[in-house]
Amino acid sequence: MEAKEGMEESLAGLRETFKSGRTRSLAWRKSQLRALLDLLRENEERIFKALHQDLGKHPVEAFRDEIGVLEKSTNFCLSHLEEWMAPKKGPLPLLFFPTKGEVLSEPLGLVLIIASWNFPISLALDPLIGAISAGNTAVVKPSELAPACSSFLASSIPLYLDTKAIKVIDGGQDVGEKLLQQKWDKIFFTGSPRVGRVVMSAAVKHLTPVTLELGGKCPTIFDSFPDSRDLKVAVKRILGGKWCACSGQACVGIDYLLVEEKFASTLIDLLKKELEKFYGENPKESNSISRIINKQQFRRLSDLLKDPLVRASIVHGGSLDEDKLFIEPTILLNPPLDAAIMTEEIFGPLLPIITLNNIEESIEFINSRPKPLAIYAFTTNETLKRRIISETSSGSLTFNDTILQYLCDALPFGGVGQSGFGRYHGKYSFDTFSHEKAVLRRPFFPELEARYPPWNDFKMNFIRLAYSFHYLGIILLFLGLKR
Amino acid sequence: MTSLSLEFFHSCSAGAGSTKAFPNSFSKRRIRPSHIQTHVSLSCSSRIFSSYSCSATLSSMAEEVEKQTFDVERAALLVQELRGSFNSGKTKDYEWRISQLKGIAKMVEEKEQEIIQALHEDLSKPESEAFVSEISMTKGSCKLAIKELNRWMMPEKAKTPMTTYPSSAEIISEPLGVVLVISTWNYPFLLSLDPVIGAVAAGNAVVLKPSEIAPATSSLIAKLLEEYVDNSAIRVVEGAVAETSALLEQKWDKIFYTGSGRVGRIVMAAAAKHLTPVILELGGKCPVIVDSNVNLQVAARRIIAGKWGCTNGQACIAPDYIVTTKDFAPKLIDALRDELEEFFGKNPMESKDLSRIVNAYHFIRLTKLLDEAKVSDKIVLGGQRDEKQLKIAPTILLDVPEESLMMNEEIFGPLLPILAVENLEDGFDVINSKSKPLAAYLFTNNEQLKKHFVRDISAGGMLINDTILHLTVSTLPFGGVGESGMGSYHGKFSFDAFSHKKAVLYRSFDGDASVRYPPYTPGKLRLLKALMSGNIIVIILALIRWLRSADKIDQ
């Protein structure tokens, strides 16, 4: 843990590096991205181990959600970086001829990335890919709640990346608070709305722009299916979006299901059957499911189940093991809507199913709650799809699958309303850490007298015509044929 | 510092709120406290509000307890009403958006004279200037939005990777909800309407708070918008500190603020409570570097047009100071003197082509900058002032000390200091030692210098061999960086500023790879690695290997 002076000194060093201009070159950016790839490839086993230690994540899940995602993002970035860095032309009206306008993406300076514990490697490094690709110097603050991953990042990053430009500062809340007091050119935060407010309030002091990647209760609309094969695939994907993503501890994970009443029992049976296929008869023994991160989160989740009415709504699972920090995949049918489990983000392996008379009611149900980071909808009904698209609001919307939108580099990833603001992934990451500088170049000729005072009627007429791009009128005016 | 000013801000609102709360509907009435005309020193929404200006507000409020207090409760009611309109879905409609934009365009067309009149009342803005910078710009924004809206609203197709095959994706622009626009007084019409055009084009309900420092324009906008647009979704609230803080207490889906960094911080702090994204259009000291190889007359004219031709220097992108070489400074000053005389006559105090200073508060602020020791003797041109008429002549100063107020605060008025340096690259250091400006200007024919300028200086926008014009180009984003603000607008950027880009991914039920699901095995890991690589050959090889291995595809 660094003392405040030490922190200020090392940040001053990073600022110096930025000033030197070294981080701006394409070569530097690419070399850092390649080094990041080396880091991931050469330390795969260590990362698997750290993730297992912190969260009991299986290597397949760890690869799918962390290492693999990062390698894919880095490769995508490497192959597009030059094109992103190229100035974009801004077309100009003829009146401005011969002027040139362009938009240049320039780095912001020194940026702070605050990661969260549920995907402790990818949520720390994915934004870093953006920060590097845009040419910034950066400090990464990994989550202290995933200590093995945090110390892995702190020890390995200096071995691979430019230590004068990229630093990992690990530590707890006190370190986080000290970091927030410093002056940054951007703060990228992943975590809860509560801490998001703290981050944004701290950013006010230096007018620092922030990106807040928060969470929310991501609903899944589950329409009934005529085709049983589709239904089976859909059910698997539900499991994939709930328990396979860090055992529900994911900001884009499914929070609850909305389904028509008549269809609920079929769905529950199918879910149970697939759960058994995935995790066996005794899921506690399965190595394919993550555990709860720590005691505090475990207690928070078990408290959600304490309400007798909630307890009574459990239709599957519900067993807890505090020593192993394990909570069985649990399904609840119609828990009370005013219970904490339906008002707070669950962020764990509990899945409430809410039944409706008609699936169309799900739109109103969703709209009466804060905007979620993601909405999932399983349906083949095109009218319903259109209604969901235009009548609900969420960070992203995925039809007939879960989580996969996170993998699409061409799609912006980020929230809206309570689920945050700002976006990243692919080019959006680059943009998030860039300032789009408008540059207009003018020659000294030709010069239009009519721009300048003293004002008279001729000039006024000229300006009127110019603004409506009425070129013929301008010619007539100059020829004295128009008044 | 921030929390202090916030507290102060809130204590103001509490003071005003306690006078009287009026529950009656204000939907058809404009809210305009009467004190705003008499107390010109109050300057909340734009530049500075000191404790001095605030106590003035409070005492005046006590004397003239008005029946129209706009307090937190009424602000809440207003937001609730607009949220109702937004939730009804009507503002999302293309037809609605177009009809509102057309309403604004029609308003500008039909009420041109009234608008010019109001601007003259508030700032003595010359008609041509008002027409160029306010009327035409607003009309242009509106027309562009009407023409392009269809295209802007179109979902954008996005490529999907092999990993998620088969799938398709698009990005949909959806409105954010109910947004707040807080405007300023120097371009009181344009800077109120331009963001509103973006908000409406994007399909939001919007509340506009024009600046009370330009009272004639503020009340005109309130009156005209009531007449020309749908009041169930677009509303004006007039007022000062109390009204603004009542508005800021509410939950908005976006806040768009134009003004000072000081108030920008208050706005952002209030927004943090509700996790509301903000766009802050602030100012800064916009530098102009002038090289010795330029066409002197043209450069001088363009500098004058950007400085005194823009509300007499009261513009956020107006040149704040000039950096030039020691040898060239006298020539530049001569050229500026000649052209100023050409533009504004021998006695600029009499010229009708110059705006006045907006109010006594700012007049005093500017004279303080001028009267500072070691500054007042640096005047090489101008310096005349008339407190009664709130006029200050175009004033040029040479070699003002770097530690003076004038070189450390945004001038925002007709004073133009010139710094003479040994070589122009030294000027870069001067600029970089200050916070990032909203605009930076360079006059040169030296390609190398242009390159270095663009590379080494960070600013919201930059313009080479001219001033101000980049503002009028709708294909360029307009906005600051660092202390000059965050977020950008104009043209499609305005539409984007008030939209959420929703990622929509469509998947079919085919091609479900069980490799995604538990129970996890080493074979699945191998295949997954291949899949994530996105390389088709690698995928096929891995698939073959997997099928031949002990793992079975479990269907």
Image (cartoon, coloured by chain):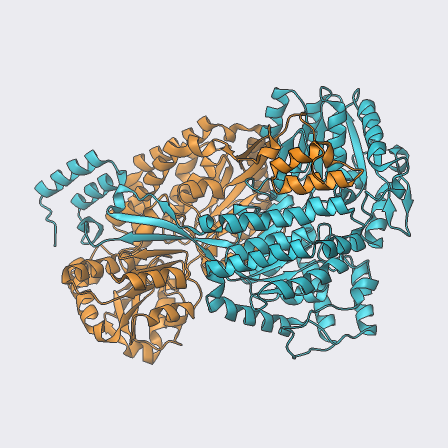
Number of on-image labels: 0
**Residue B102, x across and y down, in percent:** 57, 56
Q: What is the residue that sits farthest to the front in this orientation?
A: A481
For chain B, what colour was chosen?
A: cyan
Does residue A211 lie above or below A270 as drawn? above
Foreground pick, A259 / B151: B151
Q: Is residue A152 visible?
A: yes
Residue at 55% of width from left, 46% of height from top? B491
Does residue A109 lie above or below A220 as drawn? above
For chain A, what colour was chosen?
A: orange
Q: Is residue A201 visible?
A: no
Q: Which part of the image, by quadrant, shows the C terminus of chain A?
A: top right
Residue at 77% of width from left, 55% of height from top? B117
**Residue B401, x across and y down, in percent:** 82, 34
Tell me: B505 left or right of B211.
left
**Residue A322, x across and y down, in percent:** 31, 65
Does residue A87 lie above or below B371 as drawn? above
Toward which corner of the image does residue A321 lie, by quadrant? bottom left
Does residue B292 lie above or below A349 as drawn? above
Tell me: B403 left or right of B168.
right
Foreground pick, A403 / A349: A403
Foreground pick, B305 / B442: B305
**Residue B411, x across and y down, in percent:** 77, 43
